[in-house]
Image (cartoon, helix red, strand yellow):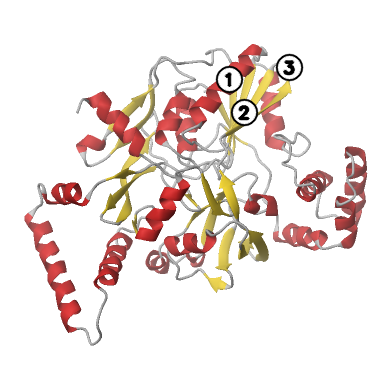
Amino acid sequence: MEPQEKKKLWLRRSLVGAGTLVLFLILFFTLGPAVFGQSAVAGISPEESHYAQMFAQVMAFVDRNYVDKVDEHKLFEGAMKGLFESLNDPYSFYLSQSDLMSLDDTTTGEFGGIGLYVEKADPSVAAKSGNSRDKYVEIVAPIEDTPAWKAGILAGDEITKINGQAVDNMTLNKVLDLLRGKAGSEVTLTILRGKATTLTFDLHRAIIQVPSVKTAWIAPDIAYIRIIQFTAHTPEDFHKAIEEFKKKGYKKLIIDLRNNPGGLLEAVVKVGSEFFKGGVIVSTKSRVPGETFTYTADDTQSIPSDIPIVVLVNKGSASAAEILAGALKDRKRAFLLGGTTYGKGSVQQVIHFDRTGFKLTMARYYTPSGVNIDKIGIKPNEVFEDKPLTDEQIQAIQKLAEEPLWRNFAHSKPDETQLAAFAVKIHRLEPTLGDRLLRRLLRLDVDRIENKAPPVIDLDYDITLKEAIRLLNAGPLPIK
């Protein structure tokens, strides 16, 4: 296989999404039993052969001698789960037949769920970490316009219970099984927000259609594009958006990667090529020589080099989003604004064998300057974002949502003038919540009641976006 052909094959096989989509959004490949067997045997070391024989002997002994009749398939699955748990890698795990069936469902771009990207340490790893919160399920990001997003679940929230069951001893696969389900069915999440605020959400699952990009005009010369995640459709959607911006004469650009959990390596490499004519976008390194590549921009640059760009990032920007942010920052093509990113710098493959499979970390990726950001993240050029809500504010918001005064007003279809006046009134009653936050909460509630998606941008509330506009209008960006 020629190097370029092999590079393309890797792209088709690679996943760099941060959270595991409920249930997975990945590109996978299949190896039949015969092929898998050949690849496993070829070049096997004496030590590997020794342990393989030991495993077979132990499994046979248990099968023949355990006091009750055993299910060989359950023995195999248990051994496989233990093997991957021993790697202490949340991104590498065994996939049962039902997991793979769910995986096949999600590659169509639609699946039944609530719309969350989640991560969870394996229970055995969490027990050793010493951090009591490692036992919970971390929400990397909610997917826009989904039940979880509409209910107000946020990046950084932690699931402590699903349908009343504590998640402490659940594997990530078990969590995904409980979150996913038939559209219309209900699931109840108990969530920890902040240090001590517990919230309960009763959600109805829906068919999740994974979005790609959204656009808006902020001023006659400032275009805005939010990349929600990197799917197979993102390069085409992104390119179309840029071409529309060109027709309308844009002079400045804001790219919003906040709460973008990642996606496909191929997609982010193609999007990266829109900014550069040649040069490194990302590299992957592995102890397997054939899995080490440097990905460079091709000749499809569509964004002129003199267009100033501000990129918005936060802790929900992960993996493929970090690849694009890292390339734009390292090559001094854009100014990064917001918060430090998530810090997921590894690439996985999903391998099928027999009727089961596994997901395995095969490489780590590096930004053009040679930095791997795993568990570190990318620090923006300027840290600028809202302070996280205090527990007191979180509790005040929950209390307000239950007040008849608030609910009745949200159902009255208020205009912006009425909404602003009501926010001032509520602020007097609840001074811990500022007018700006109250206006934002009211808008979201009104949109939910009317079953409308909120506007792409909220300039009244989004102080980071307003800072990006100020920077673009202030002259040359302070890129160093």
Location of residue 239 in the rendering, given as x and y in whole percent from the top left corner: 53, 22
Mark 1 touches mark 2? (CB < 8 Å) = yes
What is the CA distance from the residue labelled 1 to the residue labelled 2?
9 Å
What is the CA distance from the residue labelled 1 to the residue labelled 3?
15 Å
Q: Can the viewer see residue 96?
A: no
Image point 92% across, 43% down: which residue?
418
Q: Secondary structure at mark 2?
A: strand
Q: Can the viewer see residue 393?
A: yes
Residue wearing tag 2:
225
Q: Which residue is at the front of the view, 9 or 254? A: 9
Q: Secondary structure at mark 1?
A: helix
The quadrant where residue 58 appears: bottom left
Image point 91% across, 48% down: which residue?
422
Q: Secondary structure at mark 3?
A: loop
Q: Amino acid at mark 3?
A: Pro
In this rendering, the answer to whether 210 lies above or below 276 is below
Q: Which residue is at the front of the view, 440 or 63? A: 63
Q: Tell me, for residue 242, which label it has, or none.
A: 1
Image point 71% across, 24% down: which residue?
217
Q: Amino acid at mark 2?
A: Ile
Q: Tell me, for residue 220, which label it has, or none.
A: 3
Q: Amino acid at mark 1?
A: Ile
The quadrant where residue 6 appears: top left
- Image quadrant for the N terminus? top left
